Image (tube, coloured by chain):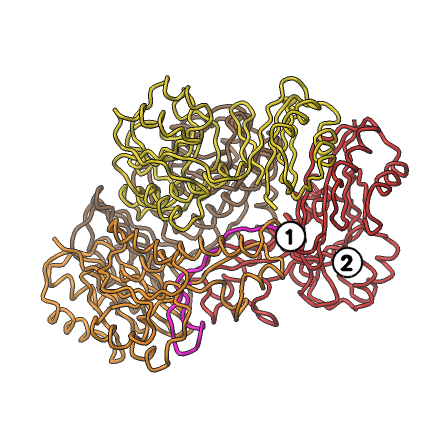
Chain colours: A yellow, B red, C brown, D orange
């Protein structure tokens, strides 16, 4: 029996879990995992339901929408490997890590293309029709128009915590400041540079013996881990958006 | 409006979430957080539902039980401070930490008694009627009869990972072994010594410069953190049992 | 036999370790731990030597200085408990943690005073003659003159990583940004607000379920740990300064 | 100017640092990093000295030995890439990670061979004359004779903390026990299976949603990190042995 995931986001009101699970129950679908969250400040409801059983997707979605407020966003995923394009430029550590994971089949992705050439990017990606574009240390600026064409579907790994050490040569900045931890941030890309919703952040400790080069190597290590973790969450349909914040059903 | 928590555990079958949330919906209670887990191996269903709204507890429980299998265990909590007794003996670091947290009101507990005297324990605890008994480095053996009277209601902090370095002088054993991490385990007490369900485990790094005394101090630090974390989870009704394992709705 | 610590900082040149250890050897002092670091960029030499044996401090210091460059800073410590004053204002969690540690004798300090009253601070501290002033969430601004009187002797715990979320209501800022980790920074105070040398930084993970209040509680927990760790390092004479960076011989 | 590392281990007595650094000083060699440790229980002295300058190795070693006790073990390393053989069998995640690191030049190793064939191992390794043999999930038992031929030169990654969950199917054991952390241990191989000196240990958190397969994947991730970290330390000549414990000059 295949596993499917239903993702719901809408304004909060009573009866939502009851309504949604009622649709699944009447269709004979068995829930094996259910997570729900209400952002009380934003009055938004989020739910991720994993269920098993054969179903007609169109009919299920229509019935679920019928029990929800008009602003509801509903998605159904069969957890099939995501179609992805990876962009990388000068630094290859994240790219290599992703290729190894892909080789071992733990990335839950179908890799359509790896691109470094900036000029040819638009047509390539258009042709590939990827679910997600992964910026694996792609140190070039994407045009606002390009970003707008893939809302919440471009994932970047950033060489630091956000907000911290914006701008060039972050590890030299970190060295000068004498930091004791180095971190990385995986986030969705929006038209606000480095300001998109954060998916994963993590740190590793460093000390005074670390040169800027050592900090950079430590940064590479944590970047790999953070990007891989973020992709796993996104590709398993565990990440929803609440404004500029992520809701992660881990 | 007060917040309540409904905790359900039963054998798994279709329609459980639908049935439970239906009862809440018909009573006009609004769900603000819902977590559900199915242990597919054990075929057990677990759910924790946080909701707001006034309700008659007896009626609600009866209605929920009516939509569940016969083996269901259902609890309703108003998240009131838990009634607790703390037992400690020679080492006081965990006790001190808990007293400070209690003073700052972050423990969600009502502290009935702190006891060290082994002989008087039975009558004292009987009189206090605690929800939970916290062994904050109580280095004495409780009688099997005593343990059986408080099933899943005695919480212990253990001076190591489990299973590891059983027996006396664990930090000397750890020193001899040259370990690079020191951990602690908070767990429920069963009649199998140190074998009860684990609630929280955590480590801190150590190195060759640590003497057995330094390891012991590092152990104390992590014990405090792990015990406080475990109590927070238990006292917020976030911990359910699946055989000898815990399900934690964090 | 008492343990002493010799701390040396000077411009780098050949023969420094040889020269210093020669003085100790000729005086019959036995080295039990020695750490040395050269900041090759700054061309500065740092050394911390732990030794046992009775010695006349003045004579030892004079002999050590005689084998070092003219710019050398040399200190001798008998690791006696440091004389400290703790300043706290509205939030008491760090203060409480330090008082418990002091009670258990693990802080290696002699606590002269705890002060909250801003006006009386100058005369009090003058009278106490503390080795260090600990700002345990002292949310008031110290005058530049006051800070200058205690160079590298005032230690602050900051409610975030530095640089990050400067200004008021950091946890609300962190919540809005949707961060996935909360950190804290212990640093020396200079006349540049929040810009002094960093001693310890650490983080704990948070997620979308954390309200600003939860983030604040998480922040409190990590602040306590980071401040206690920084004080342990400083009070054991393990922290040297290299410009705005710390060298930590842990 | 090339960097060299001098490693010394001997019984403790006064004047050792002075004696060793005197040799370096008279030869005009400049110390850029020096770490020293005395295991007071074992009365053993350990030192790692990084220095720059051209030197004749044989002469230097002879002079250093002349100022040390008769039981001294002295090594000189030019930090050249270590000659290594990697052994792997069914699971390839650690092997793949090491190959990527080797490709990026961050492993400080010269990879002579990767072997999986048990039968041909002896002759192959004899011919290769490796500095180190890395067991990257080599799930077969090496003969005691083979192990004795490479004392402190075989490094293994173990699928758990040591001591913990010895024997087969460790992740199923860990699942049954309901652990909340999964760890890994890199250690030198001795003729006592899994009992050799520990180099690195680390953990990652897990929870009740992890199946044995998920625990295994988490274990793989931490195994890679721990093995790579251990190799970095060993290949940079930062690891010394004190009986069954390691001294790590990080």
Disc 1 residue crowd, few under 14, some 14–19, many 20+, Cα 10 Å:
many
Q: Is residue C108 above or below residue A242?
A: below
Residue mark closest to the camera, 1 vs 2: 1
**Chain of the residue on which disc 2 is drawn:** B
What element does badge 1 sit on? helix
| Marks 1 & 2 on one chain | yes
Where residue C146 appears, as percent x and y from the top left, is 43, 30
Label total for image:
2
- A39 or D98, nearer to the observer: D98
Q: Is residue B44 above or below residue A21?
A: below
Residue D117 found in image quarter? bottom left
Where residue A41 appears, as percent x and y from the top left, is 64, 23
- D18 or D150, nearer to the observer: D150
Q: CA distance from mark 1 to mark 2?
A: 18 Å
What element does badge 2 sit on? strand
Q: Is residue A11 magenta?
A: no
Residue A117 found in image quarter? top left
Where residue B19 appears, as percent x and y from the top left, is 79, 37
- C133 or B157, nearer to the observer: B157
Residue B43: in sight, yes or no? yes
Q: Which sits earlier in the primary sequence, circle 1 or circle 2? A: 2
Residue B227: mark in rendering: 1
- C110 or A216, nearer to the observer: A216
Residue that mark 2 sits on: B115
Residue drawn at point x = 62 percent, y = 57 percent: D178
Residue C127: in sight, yes or no? no
Q: Is residue C165 above or below residue B140?
A: above
Where residue A231 appears, as percent x and y from the top left, is 45, 39
Q: Quadrant of the C terminus of chain D?
A: bottom left
Q: Which residues are magenta?
A: D186-208
**Chain of the residue on which disc 1 is drawn:** B
């Amino acid at each position: 029996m295949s596993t499917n995931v239903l993702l719901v986001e809408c304004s909060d009101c009573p009866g939502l879990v009851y309504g949604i699970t009622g649709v699944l129950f009447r269709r004979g679908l068995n829930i094996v995992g259910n997570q729900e969250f209400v952002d009380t400040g934003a009055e938004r409801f989020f739910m991720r339901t994993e269920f098993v059983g054969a179903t007609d997707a169109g009919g299920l979605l229509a019935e679920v929408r019928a029990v929800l407020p008009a602003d509801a966003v509903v998605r159904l995923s069969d957890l099939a490997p995501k179609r992805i394009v990876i962009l990388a430029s000068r630094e290859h550590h994240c790219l290599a890590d992703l290729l190894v994971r892909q080789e071992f089949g733990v990335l839950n992705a179908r890799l359509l293309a790896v691109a470094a050439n900036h000029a040819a990017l638009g047509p390539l990606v258009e042709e590939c029709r990827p679910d997600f574009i992964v910026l694996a240390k792609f140190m070039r600026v994407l045009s606002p128009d390009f970003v707008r064409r893939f809302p919440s579907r471009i994932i970047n790994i950033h060489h630091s915590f956000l907000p911290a050490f914006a701008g060039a040569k972050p590890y030299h900045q970190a060295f000068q400041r004498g930091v004791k931890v180095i971190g990385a941030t995986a986030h969705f890309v929006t038209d606000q540079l480095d300001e998109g919703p954060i998916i994963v952040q993590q740190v590793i400790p460093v000390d005074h013996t670390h040169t800027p080069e050592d900090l950079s190597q430590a940064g590479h290590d944590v970047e790999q881990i953070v990007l891989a973790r973020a992709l796993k969450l996104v590709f398993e349909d565990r990440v929803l958006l609440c404004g500029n914040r992520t809701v992660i059903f881990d």
